[in-house]
Amino acid sequence: MQIVPFPHPALSYKSSEVKQIDASLRKTIAKMFELMYQANGIGLAANQVGLPFRFFIVNIAGRKGESDEELVLINQEIVCRKGQVVG
């Protein structure tokens, strides 16, 4: 597993819904956390590693030892957009 560089096609296709949370998905998520920490990141989406599924991982602390900060968001969806941020 590796992070795919822009403009890899995986970064622009529509991801599929995760249908089942099983041992295989858990193993993939664990590998993604390891890869994210190696890259000194704080988040990683499935399509960034070439997987066509709708989930991403986050650890705002960015440190492997702080697993209580690890989040996995599966089948996330924006249901209401309001406001605007300019930066």
Image: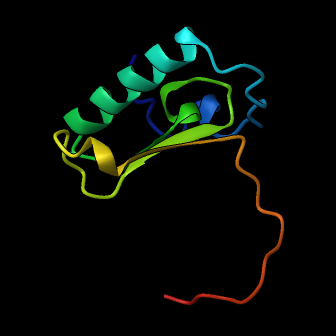
Total tally of numbered discs in the picture: 0
Quarter assignment of residue 3: top left
Quadrant of the snapshot with the N terminus: top left
As drawn, is 4 to the left or to the right of 65? right
Q: Which of 51 and 72 is in front in this view?
A: 72
Q: Which residue lies furthest to the top in this view?
A: 24
Is 17 drawn above or below residue 73 in the view shown?
A: above
Relative to the observer, which residue lies in front, 77 or 22? 22
Residue 11 is situated, as x and y percent measured from the top left of the image, at 60, 38
- Based on the displayed image, in which of its 4 quarters is residue 61 positioned? bottom left
Q: Compare residues 19 and 37 and report the one nearer the observer.
A: 19
Image point (20%, 39%), residue name = 64
Q: In this view, does 54 lie above or below 82?
A: above
**Which residue reaches farthest front?**
68
Q: Identify the residue shown where x is 77% and y is 61%.
A: 78
Give the colouring mode of the picture: rainbow
- Observer-nearest residue: 61 or 13? 61
Along the horizontal axis of the image, is 23 left or right of 1? right
Examine the rendered structure and indicate whether residue 20 appears above or below residue 39: above
Residue at 73% x, 27% y is: 18
Q: In the image, residue 16 lies at what x, y percent?
A: 78, 29
Residue in the image at 37% along x and 20% along y: 31
Q: In this view, does 79 lie to the left or right of 56?
A: right
Q: Which percent across, then down, holds residue 58?
A: 42, 48
